[in-house]
Amino acid sequence: MPWIYLLIASVFEVVFALATNATDGFTVLGPSLLTAAAAAGGIFFLSLALKTLDVGVGYTIWTGIGSVGTVALGTVIFDEALSPGKILAFFLIIGGVLGLKLADKLTPARQADAA
């Protein structure tokens, strides 16, 4: 379940970033409320994931997936440029996230909690 929680938290992170762009400095009510709700949702589900995952792994993957999702959707929604440098960084982030996922080992105490 911690990886499912982390994925849900990451979706909230993407919504948070994209909604923040639409707040116009928190002067537009709808996007401002969505930003606050998405931030709260992301942190809530991240906290559930971190009951089992190491904070260094969980937080880094949360921000990595959030970054990749924000770049991808920012390109589609806000017509942001996607340069070769951004594409390279995009794949490096994905590689780092996958590397952390594959390298993650639960400590003995956390293995008991996960069961």
Image (cartoon, rainbow, N blue to C red):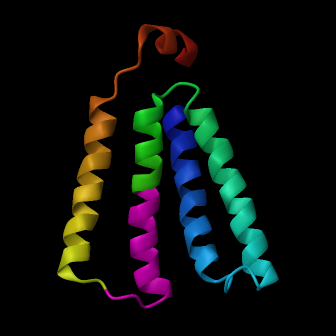
- Tell me where the magenta segment starts and ends, as one range: 65-81
Q: Nearer the viewer, residue 47 or 2?
A: 47
Residue 22 forms part of the magenta stretch:
no
Q: Is residue 47 left or right of residue 104?
A: right
Q: Splitting the image into 4 quarters, where does residue 51 fall? A: top right
The quadrant the N terminus occupies is top right
Going 71% across and 53% down the picture, which residue do you hit? 40
**Extreme right residue here?**
29
Residue 35, percent from left and from top: 69, 68
The answer to which quarter of the image holds residue 17 is bottom right
User: Which residue is at a point 47% across and 59% down the rendered structure image?
Assistant: 66
**Height in image: 32 above or below 46?**
below
In the rendered image, the vertical position of residue 13 relative to residue 19, given as above or below: above
Whether residue 66 is in magenta: the answer is: yes
Q: Residue 65's quadrant in the figure? A: bottom left
18 relative to 49, above or below: below
Q: Position of residue 14 (x, y in %)?
A: 53, 65
Tell me: residue 1, above or below residue 70: above
Numbered circles on residues, count? 0
Residue placed at 40% from the left, 36% from the top? 57
Residue at horizontal 23%, vertical 62%?
91
Residue reaching furthest bottom? 79
From the viewer's perspective, tell me whether residue 94 is left or right of residue 76. left
Q: Main secondary structure of the magenta part?
A: helix
In this rendering, position of residue 45 left or right of residue 73: right
| Quadrant position of the C terminus in the picture | top right
Q: Position of residue 106 (x, y in %)?
A: 41, 19
- Image spot of residue 90 (x, y percent): 28, 66
